[in-house]
Image (cartoon, coloured by chain):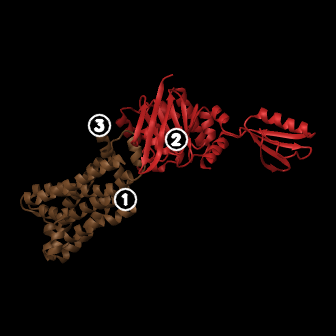
Amino acid sequence: MKAFLYGVALQWKLSLRNREVLIVYYLVPLVFFLFMGGVLTSIMPGANETLIASMTVFGVTMGGVLGMPAPLVAMYSTDMKKAYQVGGVPLWTAAASSVLSGFAHLFVMSLVIFFAAPVLFDAAMPQNLPAYFIALALLILASLCTGLVFGLVVKSAAKLSMVTQIIFLPSVLLSGIMFPASMLPAVLRGVGKLLFASWSFEAMCSPVVDAKLLLPLAGLILLPLAISAWRLNRIKAE
Amino acid sequence: MQTALTVRGLQKSYGTHRVLNGISFEVRKGQTFALLGANGAGKTTLLECMEGLRRTDAGEIQVSGRRGVQLQSSTLPAQMKVAEALRFFGLWQHHEAQPEMLRALELEPLLQKQYGQLSTGQKRRVHLALALLGEAETLFLDEPTAGLDVEGQISLHREIRRLKQQGRTIVLASHDMAEVETLCDVIAILKDGALAFLGTPAELTKVVPGAVRLKVRFSAMPAEGEWQACRPLPAENGMLRFEADRLEDAMAELLAVAGRQNLAILELLTERPTLEERFLSMVREAKA
């Protein structure tokens, strides 16, 4: 347990030293928040009501789906994997450490938006704080677990940046964070319902803790987790 | 002497391609065992099976005590500091890096450096330290000096000798025959997934044909077709060249030919091929 906890803390430090991860965990989401926060609240009446949730969903999706898998690809598709195996480190621990340290990074980034948005853009606080934070925790987990699948399945960093767009772009465009999902055609609304970003955005803006919104989100955590567990077993047996 | 490593009837295939074909050998405790083989001979697969990285199809591998592994191409996260790597892997192996080991491997000045900032030689020393962390009794070193400069090689050889003196069993895969000749007690040569040779470096020099080469200048050209112990090679600078298995047989034949044909031997040079040349000759024979 001590070794595992040290691994989690070490992973946290490594990602702070990794410029690329820092960019997608902190820099781009916060710069996007500063820029889009100003734009959205200027051109869209009522945007400040959901600004915290929308910017958080964007930032977390970016960090989890685009940022988190890169170090995992470096780990599981290179000889680093062998170094861990011969060093007596179970392979799953690298994935688990990345998820846990990623959770901490994305939570910090989300808190920055949570506290800065009302000051900078007169954003409204979420209607129900427990609902907001439960949804936020599930959003971060869903985003990281989705990233985990990419990190374990994709075998090169070059392919990773393209493949992750399959989830990232629709999440930004179809989840309702940039413009109301009701404006979308029914088909695209349906596609949006397959994405964790849509459910978590609704759950974060909900006035109550709504199980109907949280359960699909839990499913979108368990499904990638199951795929990741299967993939880790395959990697171990390779 | 106790056995440190036993490999019995090891078989491994990738699809329909049989890579290891019933390999068996033993390594005694404290021995330094060299594993040689041309590319594609199955050396890496055999090593990875012994290191526990690869499952075998059939056969048995027994390693006594803890196993320490230094991989040939291994890497760590570029941002991980040397001290952090030692602590991280040490915690998983329930051992701390000993100051004497860090001193011997000259790692103390590097502890706060990130892995990505290290030179190839420094990285190798880090991986050797990680292999030694668990107080391993049996060490697997895969081409430990590959890519190192002369200074790095000397330093690593010194460390391997120190480990040998401590009584550790070392399995060393290498392409550097000089390294093998000076460091190893036993040599195994893999050929097409099977053991082509298993013995000491001295034994290897005996079994490989062409143990000695001779250059001879006679007073006149001898008649052809008289050679038995001496196998003619292309002439060089007016000197006849021969290859023979035993120097004494070759000398006797040269003197006999000179006597029968009334020739004088004006110049005679002998040379013994290095272990590397013998190994290459074996590999060439295998390919032929």
> Residue B120 in the image: x percent, y percent?
52, 47
- Given the image, what chain letter belongs to the residue carrying mark 2? B
Q: In what element is the residue under mark 3?
A: helix
Chain identity for the colour red used in the image: B
Residue behind mark 2: B194
Q: Residues within 10 Å of mark 3 (few under 14, many from 20)?
A: few
Outermost residue, front side: B225
Observer-nearest residue: B272 or A128? B272
- Given the image, what chain letter belongs to the residue carrying mark 3? A
| Res B40 visible | yes
Seen at 67% across and 34% down, the residue is B206
Circle 1 or circle 2, nearest the eye: 2
Q: CA distance from mark 3 to mark 2?
A: 44 Å
Res A145 → quadrant: bottom left
Residue behind mark 3: A2
Chain identity for the colour brown used in the image: A
Observer-nearest residue: A1 or A121? A1
Which mark, by number, is residue A31?
none
Residue behind mark 1: A20
Residue type beneath disc 3: Lys
- Given the image, what chain letter belongs to the residue carrying mark 1? A
> Residue A236 in the image: x percent, y percent?
34, 46
Apparent side of residue B89 relative to residue B192 in the rendered image (left or right): left
Residues tagged by mark 3 and mark 2 found on one chain of the structure: no
> Residue B246 in the image: x percent, y percent?
74, 34
